[in-house]
Amino acid sequence: MEDKEKKQDSLYVKLIPYFEKYGILLLLVIMILVMHILQPDVFLSWRNVTNVFKQISWQSMLALGVFMVIVTAGIDLSVGSIMMLSLMILAIVAKAGAPWFIVVLVPLFAGFLCGLINGLGITLLRMPHPFIMTLGTLYIFRGTGNLISGGTPISGFTDEVRYLGHGRIDLTWLGLEKSQYLPVSLVLIAVVYFVFWVFLNHSRTGKWIYAIGGNPSAARASGINVNKILIIVYSLCGFLSGIGALILAGRTDSGYPNAGLQSELDAIAACIIGGASFFGGRGTVLGVFAGVMIMGILRNGLNLMDVSSFWQQVLIGSIIVLAVYVDVLRRDFGTRK
Amino acid sequence: MTSTNKLLLEAKGITKYFGTITALENVNLKVHEGECLGVVGDNGAGKSTLMKVLSGLYKPSAGALFFEGKEHVLNSPKDSQNLGLEMVYQDLALAGNLPIGENIFLGREPTKNIGFLKFLDFKKIQEMTSAHLEKLKINVKSADQKVEELSGGQRQAVAIARSTAFNAKVVIMDEPTAALAIKEVGKVLDLINKLKSTGVGVIVISHRMDDIFTVCDRVMALFQGTNFAESQLVKTSRDEVIGWIMGKK
C-alpha cells in the first residue's frame, strides 16, 4: 500500500517541474494554433507576426522588470510612469539638440534613477509594502513628466534615436523579399530576455533574488544583504522601463503625456499569466515572455477578427483568473502541507 | 564524553542587560570536540539570549568568548560563521522554493569564471551536496528536490546539513525536534550523534527530556539568567533535570 503511494508520488514529482516550466508554453502554442485556424491567411503571415512583436516590444520590457520585483514578493506599480517620465526627458533632451548617443542613454539613466528611488524608499524609508511606495511614485513620476513637458506631446526624433523601436534588419541577402524584414525591437527583446535569464538563473545575485522571495529571513540568516538586493531589483526594473521608453520613442516618434498609462497593470498581468507567484520566489523568464506573447496574440488575433476591444478586456481578465487557478491546482499537488 | 577532548568553545562570565533588565548574569559555558551539551531552562531563563550572544547576534554587556583557546569579539553572525560556529534556527531558515543544494550553499555559492563574469557552478553545488548528504547519511531523492517538497524531518536534516557544510566546529541547535512528527525525531537525533562522531561540538537547546537524554553528554540548566546546575548526563536523572528547570535542587 505504501509502495503504491510512493510510486504515484514520484510520478507527480517527476511531472510537476516540467509542467511548471513548460505548461505556459503549451498554452501559447495552443493559442497560436487556434488563431491560425481562425485566420489561416493572415495570422502567421510575416507581416502580422512582426507586427505582434513590434506591438509587445515595450510592454515586454516593463513585464520583465515587474517580474523580477514580483519574484522578491514585491510589486512595482510605477513602471508605466517611469517609462512616461523617461520618454519625456528623452524628448526634451532630443529637442534641445543633444547628439543622438546622449539622447539614447538619457532614458535608460532616468529609468534607472526612478527605480533607485523606489528601491531606496522601500528599504530606507521602511515602507510597509512596495505597493505603497510605488503607488506614490506612480503619481509622482507621471506628474513630473507632465510638469517638465507642459503636458503636451513633443514629436520628431532622428533615425538613430528611433532605431531600436523602428529599425528594420534587411533580410534580402537571404533571398527574402524587401517586406520580409526583421524588426530591431524583436532582436532587442531576444537579447534583453536572454541576458536577464542568465542573470536570474546563473548569477549569485539572481539566485538571491529567488531566495528573498522564497524566505526573506532565510536569506538574511545566510548573510545576504536583502536591502541591497532589493535596491538592485527595483533599479533594474526602472532601467528596463527606460529601455521601454526608448523603444516607444522609436515606434511613435513622439513623447506624449498618456504614454504607458495603465501599462503597469498589463505588465503585472503578463507576469501572472506567465506563472509568477505574487507570494514571491516563483516564476521563470520564459514564462513572462509567454505571458507577454499570450496577451499580445490575444489582442492581435481579436483585432484581426474585428472583435470589440471590450471583449479583449473580458478575455484577458478571464485568462488571468484561469492561469492563477491552474497554479493553485498545481500547488495542491506539488507541495506538502 | 570526557573533558580530555579539546575545548572548542568557552563562554566566561557572560552578562547581558537590556536596559534595566538583566537577561544573563555571569553565565559560563563550555563545549568540547565531539561533545553534545544540552541547555535546558524555563521560558525566560535566558537560553535564547545566550545562544544569540554565542552566534554574534547580540554583544554581551560583560564577559568573553573563547574559541579554541583564543578570545574573540563577535560583531555579527558572519563573524561566528567564519570561526566555524553555526546556528540551526528553530524556524529552519530555508527557502522552500529553492532546491536542497542551493539552500545548503545559499549565500556561499561556488562560482566559476567565464571571462570576467562569475556564474554559479551548479555541477559543483550538486557534487558537494551529494557528498555532504552522503557523509551525514541523509536520504533524499535528489539534491535537486525543492525544500518545500520535503517532510519536516527532512527539512530539519537539510538545515543541519547546511550548518555543517562549511566545516563547522560547533553547531548550536535551537529546539531541533520541536516541529517534527514523532517518527522523524529519531532521525534528527541520529544525525546529531553522527555530527558528534565527526568531532563537531553540538549545543542543543531543548524542552524535551527525551532529546537531552538521547544525544547529550552533559546538561546545564539556566534559571533566571544564571548558571543553576550542571552535570554529566550519566550522573543525573530526568526528574532531577526537570527539577532544575523549575528552580529546585
Image: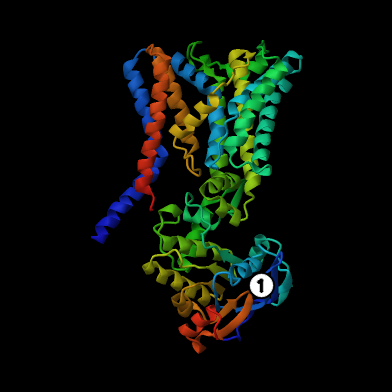
Determine which quarter of the picture holds residue A191. Answer: top right
Indicate how the structure is coloured in the image: rainbow
Q: Residue at x 40, y 36 (%)?
A: A324
Chain under callout 1: B
Q: Under tag 1, what secondary structure?
A: strand
* Numbered circles on residues, count: 1
Count residues near mark 1 (Cα–Cα under 10 Å), then give few for <14, some for 14-19, many for 20+. Answer: many
Residue B247 vs A207, above or below: the answer is below
Q: Residue at x 47, y 38 (%)?
A: A276
Nearer to the camera, B122 or B36: B36
At 45% across and 30% down in the image, what residue appears? Answer: A291
Left or right of residue A15, residue B104 in this image: right
Q: Position of residue B71 (x, y in %)?
A: 73, 73
Q: Quadrant of the N terminus of chain B?
A: bottom right
Q: Position of residue B189 (x, y in %)?
A: 45, 72
Residue, x 63% and y 26% (percent of image)? A139
Say above or below: A79 vs B57. above
Could you tell me residue B105's position as x and y percent? 55, 56
Q: Amino acid at mark 1?
A: Leu
Looking at the image, can residue B30 be seen?
A: no
Quarter of the image containing the C terminus of chain B?
Answer: bottom right
**Seen in the image, is A4 located left or right of residue B196?**
left
- Which residue is most to the bottom? B235
Any part of residue A57 in sight:
yes
Report x, y in % for residue A78.
60, 29
Q: Is residue A284 above or below residue A29?
A: below
The residue labelled by disc 1 is B24
